[in-house]
Amino acid sequence: MPSLMPLADLQRSIEALITQQRYAEAAALLHDLVEREPHSLPARMQLAHVLLQDGRFEGSARELVAAVAVPDDDPAGLIALARRLSFHGEMVQARRCIDRLERLRGTAHLHAAIAHLRWMTGEVERALTWIERAYREGLRAPDELLLQAMLCHFLGDNDRAERLLDECLAQAPDFGMAAQARANLRRQSPEHAHIDALRQQIVVLRTRSSAHPAHALNLAQFEAALAKELDDLGEIPAAWEALSRSKGILRALNPYDAAAESAITRHLVEAIRDCVPATPFRPVADTGQATPIFIVGMPRSGSTLLDRMISAHPDVAPAGELNDFLRQLHRVADVPPAGHAGMHRVLDRLGSVDPAELGRRYLAQAGWRAGGRRYFVDKLPINVQLVPLIRRALPHAPILHLVRDPMDVCFSNFRAMFGDVSPWCNDLAWTAHFHGCYRQLVDTWHADYPGAMIDLAYADLVADPEAVMRFVLPACGLAFDDACLHPERNPFPVTTPSAAQVREPLNGRGMASWKRYAGPLEPLRRALDAAGQRVA
């Protein structure tokens, strides 16, 4: 029976309990509030938040799903609801919220918010439509200009993207993400590079307090942009100096915890060995749903190229780098995502996870991305950590493991600018350590779960793409199609840092690119060699 306490007193009691972090008691009162006010979107969302704080991820998600049916078209509430649903792995319901927002009459700021939400769901063309509408309505804020530019870049319109980034940097000269995005649009030439402008802005940024993380990150991004453009021009020593300065800033901003990474790797191996029996790959002709093709491995191993080749097939759509499988694992285990700590809790509960339910939830939330095609590609590399579980939950789904030379893949990661995430990319020793953890997992999966994934060499993909495709496509249940040999013609958006490269015809320019930096990379080579990794 609902509480008879006056609503104002009830709300004050709830707020007091939340302040005291007595979440279970607050949730009980919020259940009363929701029963008394079933059409209150704020009450349901507050209940979902408190349940999340109390560690009840599944219960929190159920309240958010129930909130979708509340007849409240407050734009701010729907925006917040869509974001929270996405975090909880309820992407289908999140898209329903965004659909409702699109039907509202709103301002340029609402249209920009819709664009950001469509980008969150990976719907690039729809995001571009809404951000262009906001632009035509006069919204030219730096974040929106950057989003519009990146969406144009992902769709292959680099000239327009560059104009937007120039406009963005004219407004916000110290916006490091925009400088980096402009450098990454294409392979820079002496006629179009921005070397002098980048150096001038770096001087300005150095005069400001580097103690503020935002200023430091902007400086790191400008240094990374300078390094990339200098590398394009063949000025290798100067490029290395700029890259080293960028990485030095990032190391201070976001240190890597090697011990924590080793611990999660050990726990993954132990828990999966204990709880996940080996399951053979069982391709089926027709499940009634789109079949995912997983591409896993180290980041920067060539997964985008392989994705572009496979998704050039008329029966395949690219879905991008999805967090959906991991998010559904957290849902089925009823553990909120919280970095390594959350993953350790998931692994502790792995024995109670129903793999069939995990597979069903994944397909229910990700299958729409196939757009009516028979297959879709999920190319999140870090899913390599969960290969035996993916195989158990989705026995009919191909898992392709792309392998790249250790020096090449480690250097490619070190060169990458991932901002305040993936801290292991910011130091050569850290990169080698992370690669060692990855190899430990791969070696274990091959030994304990033979056949769970199909190994493909990046070098073979580049040297003899037809032979690789004639092997891979039938292994996935697809007929060979010549379109797969021309990824540069693939019309789908490319939403990764390698967007410019994979729009070029197949080439081997990325092979052994580390050798141009062989001297400075000698510590990396020694670290990999000491760990027993093959170095070309």
Image (spheres, grey):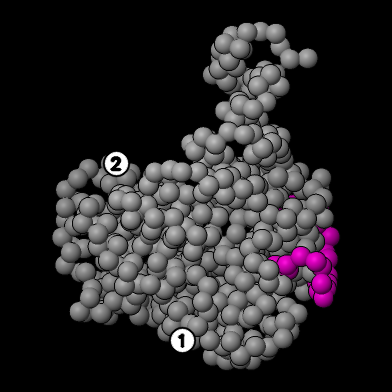
Q: Which mark is residue 505?
A: 1
Left/right placement of residue 180 relative to residue 9 reads: left
Which is nearer the eye, 105 or 78? 105
Which is nearer the eye, 87 or 243? 87
| Residue beneath the point at 50% across and 43% down | 104
What residue is disc 2 on? 212
| Neighbours of disc 2 within 10 Å: few (<14), some (14-19), many (20+) | few
Front: mark 1 or 2: 1
| Residue beneath the point at 61% across and 48% down | 96
Quadrant in which the N terminus appears: top right
Q: Is residue 301 visible?
A: no
Dot 1 falls on a residue whose secondary structure is loop
Q: Which x, y percent locates residue 483? A: 58, 87
Q: Which x, y percent locates residue 78? A: 54, 39
Left/right placement of residue 154 relative to residue 43 reads: left
Q: Is residue 108 above or below residue 313?
A: above
Indicate the amino acid at tag 2.
Answer: His
The number of discs equals 2
Q: Which x, y percent locates residue 488? A: 48, 82
* In magenta stretch: residue 277: yes
Q: Which mark is residue 79?
A: none
What range is drawn magenta here?
266-293
Dot 2 falls on a residue whose secondary structure is loop
Which is nearer the eye, 435 or 142? 142
CB of mark 1 within 8 Å of CB of mark 2? no
